[in-house]
Amino acid sequence: MDLEKESTINAIQISYAENNATLKGRVPNVYYQYLLEYSSDNKTWKTLADKTQSKTDVPHDYLELKTPIKARYIKLTNYKVPSGTFAIAGLRVFGNGGGKAPVEAKDLKLARQENDRCIVNLNWTKVPGAVGYNIRYGTQKDKLYHNYQVLCSESLTIRSLNSSQKYYFTIDAFNENGITKGKSIIELK
């Protein structure tokens, strides 16, 4: 994986996919073995995690680093999967790109459908440099406990509201450098 620039890495999560897997139910000796390495130049590699002898069932292994590292490249080498062929559903890198977080997202517009008040359409203006947006909402201004993460879009339709309930919404913009929380909270009657 190329992070496109040297970044600070605090944690990595590997989520395996079950490609051509034939195991069913609880069976013994289910484990994953791999070598995880990092590099700044794609030539000199250092070990981040050596799990080549692991006997642990970790289909979604999360590795929080005791000390953050700086790297641009991440390499995962498979040694063993319990069944089927090696496949990953996700390789997530948690850290910071070392740049600036995006500016605040603005112009959030809400439109509750008249014929079905359980549905609300949201749209907003694209924020330069944002990778995605978090739509936070709830039934009280200070309790925005529900969340949708939106990538590659400036709109969202939510179809799970209570038709007689009033809601409050805000939008956060994020990228590899951080999250910029929305300051404006909009009431939806």
Image (cartoon, grey):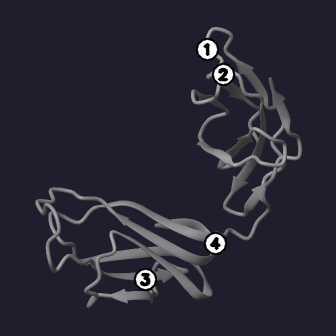
Nearest-to-viewer mark from 3 and 2: 2
Mark 1 to mark 4 CA distance (whole Å): 41 Å
Residue at the spot of label 3: 37
Residue, x 84% and y 30% (percent of image)? Answer: 187
Give me the disc on residue 95.
4
Which mark is first along the chain, 2 or 1?
1
Give me the disc on residue 39.
none
Q: Is residue 128 visible?
A: no
Image location (x, y in percent) of residue 2: 50, 66
Mark 3 to mark 1 CA distance (whole Å): 51 Å
Which mark is first along the chain, 2 or 4?
4
Residue, x 24% and y 58% (percent of image)? Answer: 18
Mark 3 to mark 2 CA distance (whole Å): 51 Å
Mark 1 to mark 2 CA distance (whole Å): 7 Å
Would you say the residues marked 4 and 3 are in contact, meaning their CB atoms lie under 8 Å apart? Answer: no
Nearest-to-viewer mark from 4 and 2: 2
Image location (x, y in percent) of residue 61: 40, 74
Residue at the spot of label 1: 116
Q: Nearer the viewer, residue 38 or 153?
A: 153
Residue, x 66% and y 61% (percent of image)? Answer: 176
Mark 4 to mark 3 CA distance (whole Å): 16 Å
| SS type, badge 4 | strand
Residue 95 in which image quadrant: bottom right
Residue at the spot of label 2: 163
Crowd band around label 4 with a 10 angstrom C-alpha radius: few (<14), some (14–19), many (20+): some
